[in-house]
Amino acid sequence: MFQAVEHLAHRRDLSAHSNADPWRRITEPPASSLLLHDCNNPASGLSPMAPNLRSNQSNNSMKNNKLKWTTVGAIASVAFCANAAAQSPDALLDKLVQKGILTKQEADELRKETDKDSSKATAKALSLPSWVTSFKLGGDFRGRYEEHHANNPAISDRDRFRYRLRYGVTATLLDDFEVGFRLASGNPNSTFGGNPLSANTDFSDGASRKFIWVDTAYAKWTPIHNDELKVNATIGKMDNPFNYSPMLFDADYQPEGAAVQGSYAFNEQHALKLNGAAFVLDEFSAGPNSSHDPFMLGAQLRWESRWTPKFESMLGIGAFDIAGKSNLIPAAAPNVNDGNTRDAAGNLLNNYNPAVGEAYLVYKLDSFPLYQGQFPIKLSGEFMKNKGAATGNEAWNAGLTLGKAGKKGLWDISYQYRHIGPDAWYEEFPDDDFTGFYSAALPGSGFGAGIRSGTNVKGHVARLNYSLFDSTTFTVTYYLGELINNPSGANSTVHHFMVDLMWKF
């Protein structure tokens, strides 16, 4: 970490020299508070720095900055020597922020530098090629209990235990390249491989060996990355570049194709972010429609603002278009969700080219009972309209989130109401946990009666997250959904209850 402090101090010195220092100033401590500590001699304790360290100090801002960051480095080194086995670098940086020695932005910069140093050491230990500048391993494991209960005697309650395991590798290369892959668990989905919307594996089949799938496999190039402008391009099977709620995309959806992302910071308060992508939905090598492979084009533009240390906002627009819909029939493509209007043969009767609007507001209270630090309150919403359908073409949500989990002892509670019209969006993308009960199948759906997710569902979502440790989060989620257009008119309400425990490593 001390190397990262020195590196950031050097960057601050250069910025001061160019009169373009974006960092907030740190109040310089008195000379008597500057301490030295010998890690190899515990008996040495703490002693004031030698007076001649400051005897020739000028009023030059570059020297002031270096002295300030040397102080931070000394404090950090003391903390690491005394508590290396008990505290993480993140915890120590948080304490420096709390004491006003670092700003949050400066602490985040140090975290990045420390991660880079650790990754470089790992790469060297593994004898990787010289063009590999860093190497990172990581993943998560989640155990889950869930229950489905429908308010209809035609279907029985369902309880099950599941797990999700994900583990991956990320390598940073010279010339601004990044290559990575991640493996994940998951139930098989007929003849199409794993479920595109879930990496969950059921506890079933007499403890049989379970499947492992390729969850992501990608290469990324970031040719522009300065304080104002960042641009990157990704190709492969990737984490979703679009930042929307599960009303549009299930959290486990990993699209395949190409994406471009960019951000421009006007200043410390305002930034513009753009996401664009072209994704392949399926590929056909034979048949009458072999030259009409289905794919999706999309773009998302966001204006993110931090008006004050306590108040933030975001306003965004987006648009999507699905081409080659003639090949998106249940028999030819993965059929996980339900809800779209089809003919008896399964052909989609509408086009899907919706426009999307989104916004959120965040206000942070100074304190809140049973919560450490500033307490964020977030209001958010999305609205989507598909001009490719005449009816059932709107989807929207509105929600409230209190707090933010992620660090030990922190928590959040959230509520959201969702309404997803039958043809507001292509059915195979939305959250597969938000469900309603079909007592009669939709025409051409490829399903019988049963509990289904997708479009044509409205209802409530409530969630509690509590971080037991930095690595471990406990989650309880409750969905209450029902069909919008109910083909039979019977009770379609479904209660979906989930309890999760997840570890990051």
Image: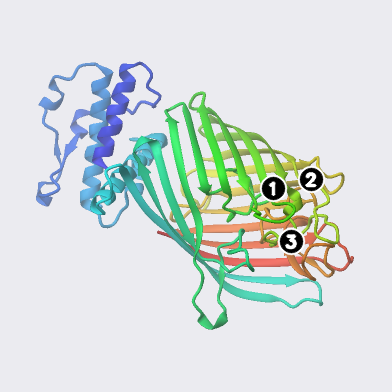
Q: Is residue 122 left or right of residue 178?
A: left
Report x, y in % for residue 333: 69, 59
Q: Earlier in the sequence, mark 2 or mark 3?
A: 3
Q: Is residue 471 visible?
A: no
Q: Residue 450 versus residue 154: which sits nearer the camera?
A: 450
| Amino acid residing under circle 2 | Asn
Q: CA separation, marks 1 and 3? A: 19 Å
According to the image, label 1 marks what residue?
291
Which mark lies nearer to you, 1 or 3? Answer: 1
Q: Earlier in the sequence, mark 1 or mark 2?
A: 1
Q: CA separation, marks 2 and 3? A: 16 Å
Report x, y in % for residue 96: 33, 40
Name the residue rendered at 65%, 51% in the picture.
281
Q: Which mark is residue 351?
A: 2
Q: Is residue 175 left or right of residue 340?
A: left
Circle 3 sits in a helix, a strand or a loop, which is it? loop
